[in-house]
């Protein structure tokens, strides 16, 4: 019972750290903060009827703002096209898609090289890869290399282990660090013996 409580607290701590990290990254990358947003003068506001009204701005300044907005939208579409090309190349090099077609059960561990629990999982998974060779495909996937996985598999926490049956259907999902004995028990429940 104490082990389960300790694991629960550990998991909650990891989750709290992840939430704080994501929030911090959002603030840093987007530059959003309350003080900045409230001090920025706007050229347009809504009146009491909800209609958009424009402050008294010179026509030249308005044209300059519209031109800058148009330039930004072009650069965004160019960046968007580059991201689409990057995603397409990631998908074509998707090691998970190939393994799911192998007809064997699959354990996919989604993590990141900078994540402490992910680093703790790596030697366990590497040992199990050797032990279960030919019976189960065990993949260690870095979401930094394959960012498309985060959206495709609805990853909210790393590491996340997803177990697929031999037909490629997801049968179990575990969030956070997963001890070796629990992995072995899940594989056994899927009909895979050591």
Image (cartoon, rainbow, N blue to C red):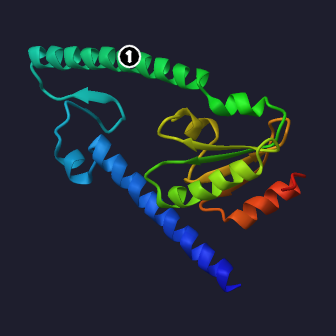
Left or right, 91 with respect to 101, comes to: left
Which residue is located at x 83 percent, y 43 percent? 165
**Spot occupied by residue 90 in the image (x, y as percentages of width and height):** 54, 25
The residue at the far front in this view is 130
Percent coordinates x, y for residue 45 in the rendering? 26, 34
Question: What residue sits 78% from the left and 29% below the top?
Answer: 101
Query: Picture coordinates of residue 160 (x, y %)?
Result: 62, 52
Quadrant (top left, top right, bottom left, bottom right) of the N terminus:
bottom right
Image quadrant holding the C terminus, namely bottom right
Of residues 9 and 36, which is closer to you in this image?
Answer: 9
Q: Secondary structure at mark 1?
A: helix
State the residue position of label 1: 77
- In the image, what residue occupies the spot 85% across and 35% down? 167
- Looking at the image, which residue is at 82% across and 44% down? 135
Residue 61 position, x and y percent, is 11, 19
Q: Is 106 located above or below residue 94 in the figure? A: below
Residue 134 occupies which quadrant of the picture?
top right
Pick the front one: 87 or 65: 87
Relative side of 106 to 83, left or right: right
């Amino acid at each position: 019972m104490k082990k389960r409580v300790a694991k629960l607290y550990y998991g909650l701590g990891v989750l709290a750290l992840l939430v704080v990290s994501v929030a911090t990254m959002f603030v840093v990358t987007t530059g959003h903060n309350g003080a900045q947003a409230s001090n920025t003068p706007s050229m347009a506001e809504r009146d009491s009827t909800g209609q958009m009204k424009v402050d008294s701005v010179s026509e030249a300044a308005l044209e300059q703002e519209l031109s800058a907005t148009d330039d930004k939208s072009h650069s965004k579409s160019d960046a968007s096209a580059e991201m689409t090309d990057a995603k397409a190349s990631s998908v074509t090099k998707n090691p998970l898609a190939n393994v799911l077609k192998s007809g064997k059960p699959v354990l996919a561990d989604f993590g990141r090289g900078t994540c402490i629990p992910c680093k703790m999982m790596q030697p366990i998974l590497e040992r199990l890869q050797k032990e279960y060779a030919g019976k189960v495909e065990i993949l260690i996937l870095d979401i930094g290399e394959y960012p498309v996985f985060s959206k495709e598999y609805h990853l909210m926490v790393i590491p996340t282990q997803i177990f697929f049956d031999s037909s490629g259907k997801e049968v179990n999902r575990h969030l956070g660090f997963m001890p070796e004995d629990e992995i072995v028990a899940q594989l056994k429940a899927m009909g895979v013996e050591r």
